[in-house]
Image: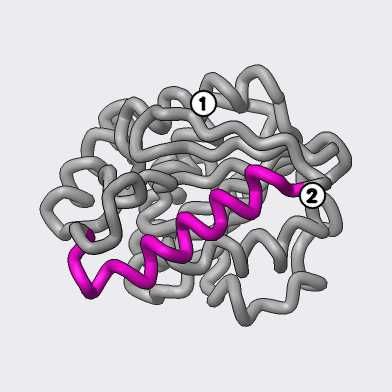
């Protein structure tokens, strides 16, 4: 987008997301994620759940040394993300792939990533983790958004809307699994919508 700053593009993306009901990270959550990534300084990052490319572009803009592969299964959102990535001027470091993360052959991806950011189907986080953690370098970190799901993960299950109960049970199960995982040190941060940070031992 010639003559337009990256900050203006981000504002355009936030407005688009609000108008078209596309879920993107809350500002507090992405701010905390960017701080953690600044400390980690990953060179290669995999994101599950591109949506329109907002978090991928925020990460690429904030971390000049990172290259990002990001997966999105929805063709419409993937197409929109490609447009925003092109406008950002960051397309050399952000590769958006249209694929279902649970069906993709991981052999098609880079063998090792320093960081993996999971922000896709909320009820499938454990399946995503189990499939992709083998691509994480020793000492690498997996970041998982939406671990609170607007407070529902902390509510008695009978108070959760019926249509969301399976998802909330899955999120709780995943949190419990990671809390005692022998291969990862995990911490749940009460920022944004709940950010789980898991460092590979």
- Determine the residue located farthest toward the bottom in the rendered image: 103
> Where's the N terminus, which quadrant?
top left
The magenta-colored residue range is 160-181
Give the SS element for disc 2.
strand
Please tell me whether residue 198 is drawn above or below residue 189 in the rendered image.
below
Image coordinates for residue 182, horizontal then vertical, percent: 81, 47
* Residue 56 is at least partly visible in this image: yes
Please tell me whether residue 124 is drawn above or below residue 27 in the rendered image.
below
Residue in the foreground of this view, choosing between 149 and 5: 149
Q: Residue at x 76, y 42 (%)?
A: 184
Q: Which of the two labelled residues, at mark 2 and mark 1, occupies the earlier sequence position?
A: 1
Q: Residue at x 67, y 39 (%)?
A: 198
Q: Is 10 part of what is drawn in magenta?
A: no
Q: Is 162 part of what is drawn in magenta?
A: yes
The residue indicated by pointer 1 is 34
The residue indicated by pointer 2 is 136
Question: Residue 154's quadrant in the figure?
Answer: top left
Image coordinates for residue 57, horizontal then vertical, percent: 47, 40
Q: Which mark is residue 15?
A: none
């Amino acid at each position: 987008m010639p003559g337009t700053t990256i900050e203006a593009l981000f504002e355009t993306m936030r407005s688009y997301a609000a108008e078209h009901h596309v879920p993107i990270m809350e500002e507090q959550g992405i701010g905390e994620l960017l701080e953690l990534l600044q400390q980690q300084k990953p060179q290669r990052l995999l994101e599950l759940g591109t949506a329109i490319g907002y978090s991928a572009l925020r990460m690429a803009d904030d971390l000049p040394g990172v290259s990002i592969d990001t997966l999105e299964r929805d063709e419409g959102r993937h197409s929109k993300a490609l447009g925003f990535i092109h406008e950002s001027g960051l397309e050399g470091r952000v590769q958006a792939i249209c694929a279902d993360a649970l069906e993709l052959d991981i052999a098609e991806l880079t063998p090792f990533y320093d960081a993996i950011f999971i922000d896709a189907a909320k009820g499938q986080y454990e399946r995503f983790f189990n499939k992709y953690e083998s691509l994480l370098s020793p000492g690498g970190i997996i970041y998982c958004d939406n671990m609170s799901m607007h407070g529902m993960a902390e509510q008695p299950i009978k108070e959760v809307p019926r249509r969301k109960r399976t998802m909330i049970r899955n999120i709780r199960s995943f949190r419990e699994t990671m809390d005692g995982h022998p291969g990862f040190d995990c911490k749940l941060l009460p920022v944004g919508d709940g950010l789980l940070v898991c460092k590979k031992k």
